[in-house]
Amino acid sequence: AAGTIEANLDNYIEAGKAEFVSALAAARSVYADENALQSEVDPAATALLDAMVTLRLKADKSLLEQTMTIAASIDITAYTDETIAAFNAASDNANAVYANEAATQDEVDKAQQDLQAAIDGLKAVETAAETGVSVAGDKTVTTGSGNTKTGESQAAAMAMTTLVLAAAAFALSKKKKR
């Protein structure tokens, strides 16, 4: 087990690495001594086990990193001040946790979840069109159906009038020929 840990020592945080390497070297020295007594083996084995127990794997920060990348691409100018403040606080915390090599997996997971919640909680600033603010020369910006007034109803009325007049002219011309 100690050999496996040694081979993957880069996967562990710095705290405890030096103690593990030292205890492993001492245990190997006792192991190599053919004349070692049990009173020498027991303390070396205990020291190595204690060093192995204190080692802690680095937290997996890949999901936090992905969420931070998404957060960095967001244009916060389009959102309300309140939601931007929550977003910035969560983003700052996520950056601090990401930079902390000794962060636990629980801390990393919580920072990622808080940042994702802040992203999901961003609320867009309402524009004049969304609030129904009056525009000069018009009573409202939108029609009753929620569509923006663009004048398309005038074109439809003009087409209908032309069609009715053409039908009337056709009918009159047929009547005169009889």
Image: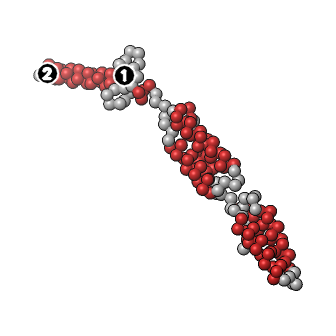
* Residue projecting furthest to the front: 39
Quarter holding the C terminus is top left
| Left or right relative to 57: residue 77 | left
The structure residue drawn at horizontal position 55% and vertical position 36%, both measured from the top left corner, is 84
Figure quadrant of residue 161 = top left
Q: Which residue is mark 1?
A: 140
Position of residue 78 measured from the top left corner of the image (x, y, whole percent)? 53, 32
User: Which of these two is toward me, 51 or 5?
Assistant: 51
Secondary structure category for the residue under label 2 = helix
Q: Which residue is mark 2?
A: 175
Position of residue 21 measured from the top left corner of the image (x, y, whole percent)? 80, 66
Q: Amino acid at mark 2?
A: Lys
The structure residue drawn at horizontal position 60% and vertical position 56%, both measured from the top left corner, is 106
User: Which of these two is toward me, 76 or 19?
Assistant: 19
Q: Is residue 30 above or below residue 92?
A: below
Position of residue 68 measured from the top left corner of the image (x, y, whole percent)? 61, 46
Query: Which labelled disc corresponds to residue 18?
Result: none
User: Which of these two is toward me, 45 or 103?
Assistant: 45
Figure quadrant of residue 156 = top left
| Left or right relative to 42: residue 105 | left
Disc 1 and disc 2 in contact, CB within 8 angstroms: no
Q: Amino acid at mark 1?
A: Thr
